[in-house]
Amino acid sequence: MNDTRKVVIGITGGIAAYKVPLLVRLLHKNGCEVKTVMTAAAKPLVGVEALRTLSGNPVYLDGESYYDMGHIRLSDWADVLLICPATANTIAKIACGIADNLLTTLSLSVPEEKIIVAPAMNCVMWANGATQANINILVDRGITVLPVEDGELACGVSGPGRMIGVEEIARRVLAHGGGAGESMSRLLEGKNVLISSGPTEEPIDPVRVITNKSSGKMGAALARAALSSGARVTVVSGPASEPLPAGAEVVSVRTAAEMGREMGERFGAADICVMAAAVSDYRPVNSSDTKLHRSDNKNITLELTPNPDILAKLGAAKRPDQLLVGFSLESGDDVSRAEAKMKRKNCDVMVYNRVDAALGGDSTCFTLLFADGRKESFSVMDKTEAAKIILANVINLAICN
Ligand SMILES: Cc1cc2nc3c(=O)[nH]c(=O)nc-3n(C[C@H](O)[C@H](O)[C@H](O)COP(=O)(O)O)c2cc1C
């Protein structure tokens, strides 16, 4: 990366502070220089030594650098001030222009367009009228306020208020104001990414097939995201309507058997493999070489046999240095099938999405399931955006491996 983005992370006293060391690492890996500032309430929630080591810079604690005009030195230095997690308290102080600690004083010293706020709090605190009014004040002043997630909170209840994932925060910081780039930079430079995409077709006769509604949009979006992260990308694609990006090697297939063969041949060379294709689970036992004809309005029976499970085969062949991502399309809200599938097929990440929210359309909502038991849910978004989030999470795993 050419330009080093200088990021000050202001850490406040929210439980999500424990995630900040990972964020520091992600930003650092993406060519950012990072300094951290903590409020007194944040100090018990995150390790100062971890932050110091990962950022390679001293941690600015309240009281120490305060009387040394630390806020002015940091505001001169910073390209971006990211307040993460941002408590209801600190958001309220910024909205009112209160400057009673190093971070809030710094927030007054940095131009609003350089400030990004990642709120994190209990859902009742988030819904409170005062918090919402304060958020609106920040937005009106030109501060970027990141969304919150709806999900299980550290306090045990569920609802909107949870901080979005650190990969997504890193991506927003890198994209903020241009410069360091929209993508997770070139972190996949020299890596091979193998993606399966689109539907498959199982012939019944020369003119009829069993297929599904997959458009190949997610596979194409993943290919674009991987290319812009610097990867060499190969897409094994069934007959999809969505065009694949120039720059990706495309291997066109029709049946699940062909897709299995082509993926199997290329898997050994892949660093990351994403099975985004909607592979037909079954194929006709017998497919006719000649066109079948209607005969006296009688029913006919089509006997189907299961196709080989491509994801399971890849999972069985996976080396420790490879990452395997599967997709699990389900009819209901129950993620347990997707979790079981992830374990059975030895995947590192499983993308769970619902049939009604994902298949064929431009948008999707999804939950990422990780082999270590973590789960992150994302509300509805464009597939291009979803692909970036999925890839950012995979990159994060690759870095942490
Ligand atoms: C363990 C713990 C977790 C907390 N988590 C949050 C949180 O996620 N969001 C929040 O707004 N406040 C949270 N609080 C309350 C804040 O720490 C409290 O409002 C504090 O005054 C915030 O100070 P600061 O904004 O200067 O960091 C938490 C408090 C404790 C003790």
Image: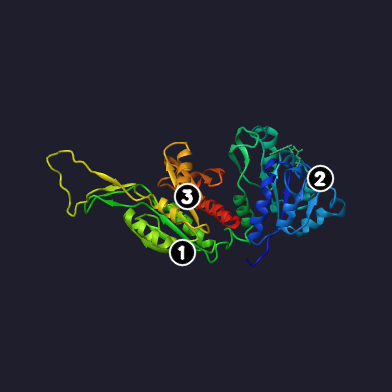
Q: Nearer the viewer, residue 383 or 59?
A: 59
Amino acid marked by disc 2: Ala
Q: Position of residue 390 (x, y in %)?
A: 52, 51
Reading the image, the residue beneath label 2 is: 99
Which residue corresponds to mark 3? 346
- Residue 269 is marked as 1
Which mark is in front, 3 or 1?
3
Quadrant where the N terminus sits is bottom right
User: Residue at coordinates 64% horizontally, 67% vertically from top-left?
Assistant: 2
Which of discs 3 and 2 lies nearer the camera? The answer is 3
Residue type at numbered disc 3: Asn
At x 79%, y 52%, the residue is 60
Left or right of 250: which side holds 24? right
For marks 3 and 1, give the CA distance: 18 Å
- Which residue is situated farthest in the left direction here? 296
- First along the sequence among labels 2 and 1: 2
Question: Which quarter of the rendered image does ligand 1 occupy?
Answer: top right
